[in-house]
Image (cartoon, rainbow, N blue to C red):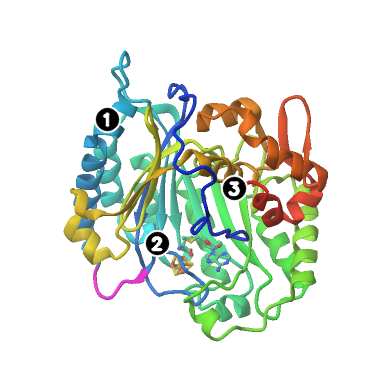
Amino acid sequence: MTLRLEAAGRREAGGERRRKALAPLEGIPLSLYIHFPWCVRKCPYCDFNSHAARGDIEEDRYIDALIRDLDYELSLAPLASRLSPPGRSLPPPLASIFAGGGTPSLFSGRAVGRLLEAVAARLAFAPDIEITLEANPGTADAGNFSEYRAAGVNRLSIGVQSLEDAQLKRLGRIHGRDEALAAYRTARAAGFDNINLDLMYALPQQTPAQALADLRAACALAPEHLSYYQLTLEPNTEFAAHPPPLPDDETAWTMQLAGQDLLAAQGYAQYEVSAYAQTGRQCRHNRNYWEFGDYLGVGAGAHGKYSSPGGIVRRARHKHPRSYLEAAGGAAAVQEEKAVAAAELPFEFAMNALRLNQGFSRDLFEHRTGLPIAALDTALNQARQKGLIEEDRHQIRASAFGRAHLNALLREFL
Ligand SMILES: C[S@@+](CC[C@H](N)C(=O)[O-])C[C@H]1O[C@@H](n2cnc3c(N)ncnc32)[C@H](O)[C@@H]1O
Ligand code: SF4
């Protein structure tokens, strides 16, 4: 959330080059993202594809649309060849599924169960598949949580944001501290042993001491994972139009550094700009994005990326639930499809992989982009001279200075 570098409008050096070397597609992990575009109410800071649910959500209609959309995605020729390249008859098993939003927890356990059954009938699941569902504490229903768990969801991501009532009010949340704590207890009681809490800092009028107290309260719950985001003002949100008094950049940076120290002391290792986890509990789904793996995206506004013998293709669905519902199952649901030019791959890869504290290996770059590591020579030389990266025999990663100036580092790859 802290980093938004616009990739659009960039000039391509050398025009549309084809991938020189074709990546061996074997071994690129495949994930599935499913978007749920409704929330009880739109939060004033949020620019996600989420719409206030006016009246009842027609959940069966939406689940049917998602299944048709997945069938369409699987029928596409390049994708079909990606999934079943010559000599390999079975699609790779899904490494992870992420039901995100919006607020997927507005959907019943029955609906989520029907959806997962339909996915399982179409794609194999890896034996250790991670299946995450995002929940808003204001929609935490014990019956639903137990049904999600029974349906195969094995990781819950709860949007707590803060554990201070005054802050939750300023953020326009539909829940207070007590509901957030109750949602966490409900999740544990339903059998979830892998829980993420989303927390934000640099909130309106927040002091560093208050941010740390909030973080300490979240750690005391002992979730397996914490996503710790700096609140940012996003265009076209209520907060952008009427900005609340936010801490300045320097104060926000102080909060981030102090937060990192506190989290480390509590056993949460930072592995990405905003992601912290207990040992063995990093989010596999997000890691696959950051490691430039492949993912199918179904649902309103969902994005997918996959590698085929001809190169990497990105595809995005229509954002508005109404247009999506009408078109799902055919090409009309696709708003944008783009073959990523070889010249854009170094930046796209770096934009993801350099978010990870451990950075990336030269082999990973070559495997995921199909380009030789020499394609990064100029960018790496410049970044090295400016002290933005550090390297050893295996890994290339952002230095501490590079992490503090991530946008400057990424610009070297443009
Ligand atoms: C899709 S929401 C999570 C689930 C659910 N919709 C909720 O809010 O409880 C994803 C997360 O992104 C974070 N987020 C949203 N807008 C943000 C912003 N402007 N700045 C920082 N983080 C933001 C919040 O922590 C939020 O929980
Ligand atoms: S509930 Fe979550 S997705 Fe919905 S508007 Fe609020 S932050 Fe955005």
State the residue position of label 3: 351
Sequence-wise, the earlier of marks 3 and 2 is 2
Label 2: few (<14), some or many (≥20) within 10 Å? many
Estimate the x, y position of residue 354 in percent, counting from the top left.
65, 44
Tag 3–tag 2 contact (CB < 8 Å): no
Q: Is residue 329 left or right of residue 311?
A: left
Residue flagged by tag 2: what amino acid is it? Answer: Thr
Question: Which element is circle 3 on?
Answer: helix
Asked whether 33 or 240 is in front, the reply is 240
State the residue position of label 2: 103
Give the distance between the C-alpha atoms of the residues marked 3 and 2, in whole angstroms: 27 Å
Please identify the residue farthest to the front as the structure is shown: 14
State the residue position of label 1: 80
The answer to which image quadrant residue 251 occupies is bottom right
Which dot marks residue 125?
A: none
Q: Please report the residue visible at 62 percent of the width from the left and 65 percent of the height from the top.
A: 200
Labels 3, 2: front one: 3
Residue flagged by tag 1: what amino acid is it? Answer: Ala
For the N terminus, give its image quadrant. Answer: bottom right
Asked whether 333 or 62 is in front, the reply is 333
Residue flagged by tag 3: what amino acid is it? Answer: Met
Tag 1–tag 2 contact (CB < 8 Å): no
Labels 1, 2: front one: 1
